Image (cartoon, rainbow, N blue to C red):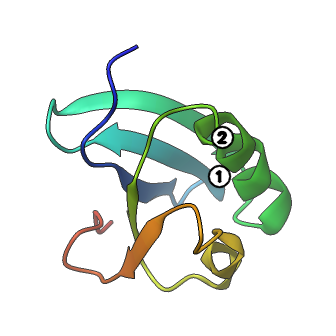
Amino acid sequence: MRPLKSMKFGIFVKKTNKEWVYIVFDGVKKLVVDYQVGDRDILTFDKVYQRIKQLNIKTIHTDNFNVYQNIEKDLYKHTTTKNLTPSD
C-alpha cells in the first residue's frame, strides 16, 4: 500500500437521527480511506482510530472535539482547526 501523504479526519452529522460519520480522507488523492458510523463519543472514535493506525499516516487534521485528545502525539502530527474540517 502506498503511504498517505496527508489525512483529514472529518466528521459529518445527519441531524435527524443523531448518528455521526467519522471519515478518514486522503487530502492528496481526494479519497475516502475509511469511515465509522455511530455516536459522537470515544467508543466510536476508537473503532476507526484503531483501524487507521494500520495505515502509514503521518498527519491528522481534526476539529477540537475532546475525543481527539487521545490521538498519540508521538505517532502523528495532529492539528486542530475548523478550517481543515468539513462543517454541517
Question: What is the secondary structure assignment of the residue under circle 2?
Answer: strand
Residue at 57% from the left image edge and 61% from the top image edge: 75
Disc 1 crowd rating (10 Å Cα; few below 14, some 14-19, many 20+) is few
- Residue behind mark 2: 37
Q: Is residue 2 left or right of residue 43?
A: left
Could you tell me which secondary element the residue under label 1 belongs to?
Answer: loop
Where's the N terminus, which quadrant?
top left
Quarter occupied by residue 63:
bottom left
Q: Which residue is drawn at 41% across and 70% down?
A: 77
- Residue 82 point in image, percent of width and height: 28, 81
Amino acid type for the residue under numbered disc 1: Asn
- Residue 86 in the image: state x and y as whole percent: 28, 63
Q: Is 20 situated left or right of 60 in this image? A: right
Q: Which label was assigned to residue 17? A: 1
Q: Which residue is drawn at 40% across and 53% down?
A: 58
Say above or below: 36 vs 72. above
Quarter of image, res 68: bottom right
Q: Which residue is drawn at 63% across and 69% down?
A: 71
Q: Position of residue 59 (x, y in %)?
A: 37, 59
Q: How crowded is mark 2: few (under 14 residues within 10 Å), some or many (20 or more)?
A: some
Q: Quadrant of the C terminus?
A: bottom left
Horizontal and vertical percent for residue 13? 49, 57
